[in-house]
């Protein structure tokens, strides 16, 4: 029997279409549909009740389960719905609520749940960081020896029963207990050397309680995602997996247990541990990003176990090479046996767009090369049927024709661009003068005070502003009307910053809905979707562009808006660009050439823009590399190669500017400590970087002796929370920075851009930020 598996994300899924009859085992990561996005934001704004939000969520779950059931899916997942993210859901299940939220036990409600995710008026949110090497975020658990775990969220069992009442039997999905701990951090005040895995004995009883309730309710399948198994783990960490599943074995008796891995190769020792876990029925492997795992599977896969072969790419949007995948699957039949081989996506489809049916304006040729989530389900099913001797010849033939079209299309290749990118490899591309001398030259020109203040780029995206952009794209207003409206918005933002007495200004980016999408729209080699939304965190979603061909810049992209803004003020106005590595990592990238080759092409395009901004009189240029850390490979052996070409790509963009032109960059929401030397090697004049939400972990590298001579602005408050920090709080944060950083290099700024906030939050927060900087300037002056 051929069983098919698919992982699915239902974000923005209004009409879910499937046409297969084969069974599908799924473990979706269900981001919110548009209805839930609006319901969440309405609830957060106090415009709707918890009951309203719960009703929207229940209606969506019911609809999704019924749609999957009607499509003929036998194994339908549950506990994949989340109001924020699956790790936070696990924290709630375990009752691991930090004491600052004043939770008094019992079932965790929305107030506590969303306070952990977003903060509240009195306390900050928990740290948010990237999910492995993706652009999806999760809330990092804060744990210590004194945490009192308790079964505090019955969500998994409730949702299973909810589906069963509809006549749908589901497979509950959990973040595995060991991965949950390995993704956690020591709570504030807990020694950094604290062994998080020492808490395993305390959380396993709660997993057992949940499993017991699920068995009593009738569940027969369960899945644990243990994605940390693809990382470089030490022997004691691997032993924790054996310990955990040995402890859970009796509780899981009578259940079919799947352990899922994804995003990279499983190392040999981890593979041995994984495939020896007691009580486990089957294993999922990513065979797109983990090709080397194939050798381990072919040589030592245990007999009698299910092999979930991830041959359909769950993280990108290119149509599968069905012929190649079928050949691979046929070779795996000899390993696992026909009745135990499971055709699967490589990972959850949370990371890809939902359905090409929604893309009515996408270029037909490019569209033929793509497969979104709904199409990937069809690919999985087609491969399973082909293995069973029911090959759809017409479907396979059309797929082969699309693959050939993509390889031969003249729009994919630009010989001049390829030659220019290839020529970059032999040079270092560094500015001729060292950063200390450059900073002196820039200070003479800019004449900034100590502790200069700035923001990261974007200002709030108002309803009116979104309407203007939407109407311009729909050609309901003229270009002249559009420019007039955007100019008025820029003027408001400039005036506000001057009133606040901010030192280095931004134009607020009112012409941009999304920074990567904005630049991609103006570069050759990119295509764009109308509804290709992907969840980033909470209700925040992005629409990644598609890089299908060689990249170049036909014309200037930001010079018009930046020079317009500079003419409105005598203060320095930052030119705002997105860096090549971030454009790469936040796009759906072509898979027919190396990522570094594509990145070099983008770097050359951004270099052209930087030099045109400088010629236009812009003396401060920010080139954001928010996603540089995000793209770091999960295995340490691959770090050096990635960091070499990623940092080189950044340096390419600004190697030709004058010493007096100040180059800024920005990074956010990742652990930067392990790549601090690569950050220094970027040779930017000023870097602004997330700091406040991660308990100021960034400052620890400077306490430990790392010397940094360029300008640096560790964020002084968290913009992903509606909470407004006081002047005193920001003053204290800056003082902590001054304990480890020189006064003459420290900048004062928020953690990230202000796009997602409202002006009622932005104005007082920035007022307090400027007031704190001025207070410290006065204190420093009086201390001399």
Image: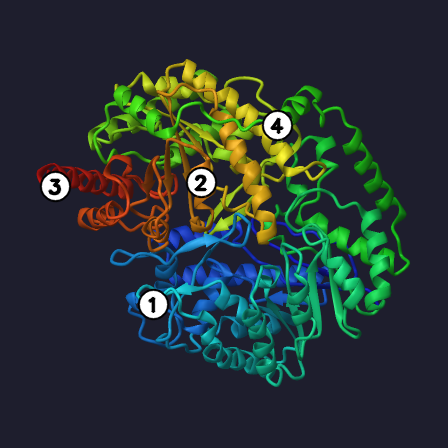
The circle on residue 140 is: none
Badge 4 density bin: few <14, some 14–19, many ≥20, Cα 10 Å: few
First in sequence: mark 1 vs mark 4: 1
The circle on residue 190 is: 1
Comparing 491 with 738, the one in front is 738
Spot the residue most to the left. Answer: 782
Comparing 766 with 513, the one in front is 766
First in sequence: mark 4 vs mark 2: 4
Badge 2 density bin: few <14, some 14–19, many ≥20, Cα 10 Å: many
Look at discs 3 and 4 and give the one toward the viewer.
4
Up-down relation of residue 294 to residue 217 (above or below)? above
At which x and y percent is residue 301? 77, 68
**Tag 4 secondary structure:** helix
Report how far apart the C-alphas of labels 1 and 3 lie in the structure.
32 Å
Q: Which residue is drawn at 44% across and 48% down?
A: 672
Badge 3 density bin: few <14, some 14–19, many ≥20, Cα 10 Å: few
Comparing 148 with 382, the one in front is 148
Look at discs 4 and 2 and give the one toward the viewer.
4
The circle on residue 426 is: 4
Report how far apart the C-alphas of labels 1 and 2 lie in the structure.
28 Å
At which x and y percent is residue 429? 52, 26
The residue that disc 3 covers is 779
Residue 426 lies left or right of residue 330; in this view the side is left
First in sequence: mark 3 vs mark 4: 4
Rendered image quadrant of residue 589: top right
Q: Residue at x 30, y 66 (%)?
A: 189
Q: How is the image coloured?
A: rainbow
The residue that disc 2 covers is 679
Spot the residue most to the bottom. Answer: 250
Look at discs 1 and 4 and give the one toward the viewer.
4
Rendered image quadrant of residue 498: top left
């Amino acid at each position: 029997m051929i069983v098919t598996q698919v992982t699915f994300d239902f974000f923005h899924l209004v009409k879910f279409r499937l046409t297969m009859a084969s069974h599908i085992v799924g473990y979706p990561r269900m981001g919110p549909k548009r209805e839930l996005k609006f319901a969440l934001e309405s609830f957060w704004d106090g415009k709707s009740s918890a009951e309203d939000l719960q009703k929207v969520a229940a209606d969506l779950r019911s609809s999704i389960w019924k749609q999957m059931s009607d499509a003929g899916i036998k194994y339908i997942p549950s506990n994949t719905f989340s109001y924020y993210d699956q790790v936070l859901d696990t924290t709630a299940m375990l009752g691991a609520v930090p004491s600052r939220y004043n939770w008094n036990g019992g079932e965790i409600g929305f107030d506590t749940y969303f306070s952990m995710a977003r903060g509240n008026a009195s306390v900050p949110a928990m740290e948010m960081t990237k999910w492995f090497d993706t652009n999806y975020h999760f809330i990092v658990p804060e744990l210590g020896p004194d945490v009192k775990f308790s079964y505090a969220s019955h969500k998994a069992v409730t949702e299973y029963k909810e589906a069963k009442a509809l006549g749908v039997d589901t497979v509950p999905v959990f973040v595995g207990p060991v991965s949950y701990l390995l993704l956690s951090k020591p709570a504030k005040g807990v020694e950094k050397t604290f062994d998080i895995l020492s808490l395993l004995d305390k959380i396993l009883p709660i997993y057992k309680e949940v499993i017991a309730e699920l068995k009593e309710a009738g569940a027969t399948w369960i899945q644990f995602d243990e994605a940390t198994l693809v990382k470089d783990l030490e022997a004691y960490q691997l032993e924790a997996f054996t310990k955990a599943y040995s402890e859970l074995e009796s509780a899981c008796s009578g259940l079919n247990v799947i352990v899922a891995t994804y995003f990279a190769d499983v190392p040999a020792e981890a593979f041995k541990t994984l495939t020896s876990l007691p009580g486990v029925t089957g294993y999922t492997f990513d065979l797109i990003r983990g090709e080397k795992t194939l050798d381990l599977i072919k040589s030592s896969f245990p007999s009698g176990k299910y092999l979930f072969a991830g041959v359909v790419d769950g993280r990108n949007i290119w149509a599968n090479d069905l012929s190649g995948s079928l050949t691979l699957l046929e070779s795996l039949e000899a390993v696992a046996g026909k009745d135990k081989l499971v055709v699967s996506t490589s990972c959850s489809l949370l990371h890809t767009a939902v359905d090409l049916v929604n893309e009515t304006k996408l270029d037909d040729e490019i569209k033929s090369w793509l497969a979104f989530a709904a199409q990937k389900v069809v690919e999985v099913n087609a491969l399973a049927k082909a293995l069973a001797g029911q090959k759809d010849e017409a479907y396979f033939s059309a797929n082969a024709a699309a693959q050939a079209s993509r390889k031969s299309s003249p729009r994919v290749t630009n010989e001049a661009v390829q030659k220019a990118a290839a020529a970059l490899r032999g040079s270092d591309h560094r500015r001729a003068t060292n950063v200390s001398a450059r900073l002196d030259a820039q200070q003479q020109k800019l004449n900034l005070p100590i502790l200069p203040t700035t923001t990261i780029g974007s200002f709030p995206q108002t309803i009116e502003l979104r309407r203007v952009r939407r109407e311009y794209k729909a050609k309901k207003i003229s270009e002249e009307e559009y420019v007039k409206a955007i100019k008025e918005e820029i003027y408001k933002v400039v005036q506000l910053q001057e009133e606040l007495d901010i030192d280095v200004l931004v134009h607020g980016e009112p012409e941009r809905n999304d920074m990567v999408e904005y630049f991609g729209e103006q570069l050759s080699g990119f295509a764009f979707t109308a509804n290709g939304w992907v969840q980033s965190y909470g209700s925040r979603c992005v629409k990644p562009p598609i890089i299908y061909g060689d990249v170049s810049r036909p014309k200037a992209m930001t010079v018009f808006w930046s020079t317009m803004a500079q003419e409105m003020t005598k203060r320095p106005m930052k030119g705002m660009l997105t860096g090549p590595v971030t454009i790469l990592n936040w796009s759906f990238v072509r898979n027919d050439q190396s990522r570094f080759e594509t990145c070099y092409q983008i770097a050359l395009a951004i270099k052209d823009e930087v030099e045109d901004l400088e010629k236009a009189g812009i003396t401060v240029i920010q080139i954001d590399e928010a996603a540089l850390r995000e793209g770091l490979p999960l295995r340490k052996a691959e770090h050096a190669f990635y960091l070499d070409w990623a940092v080189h790509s950044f340096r390419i963009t600004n190697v030709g500017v004058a010493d007096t032109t100040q180059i800024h960059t920005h990074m956010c929401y990742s652990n930067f400590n392990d790549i601090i030397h690569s950050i220094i090697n970027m040779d930017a004049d000023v870097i602004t970087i997330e700091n406040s939400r991660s308990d100021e972990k960034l400052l620890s590298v400077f306490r430990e002796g790392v010397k940094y001579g360029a300008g640096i602005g560790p964020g002084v408050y968290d913009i992903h929370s509606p909470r407004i920090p006081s002047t005193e709080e920001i003053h204290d944060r800056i003082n902590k920075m001054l304990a480890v950083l020189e006064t003459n290099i420290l900048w004062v700024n928020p953690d990230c851009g202000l796009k997602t906030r409202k002006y009622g939050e932005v104005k007082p927060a920035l007022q307090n930020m400027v007031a704190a900087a001025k207070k410290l300037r006065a204190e420093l002056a009086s201390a001399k």
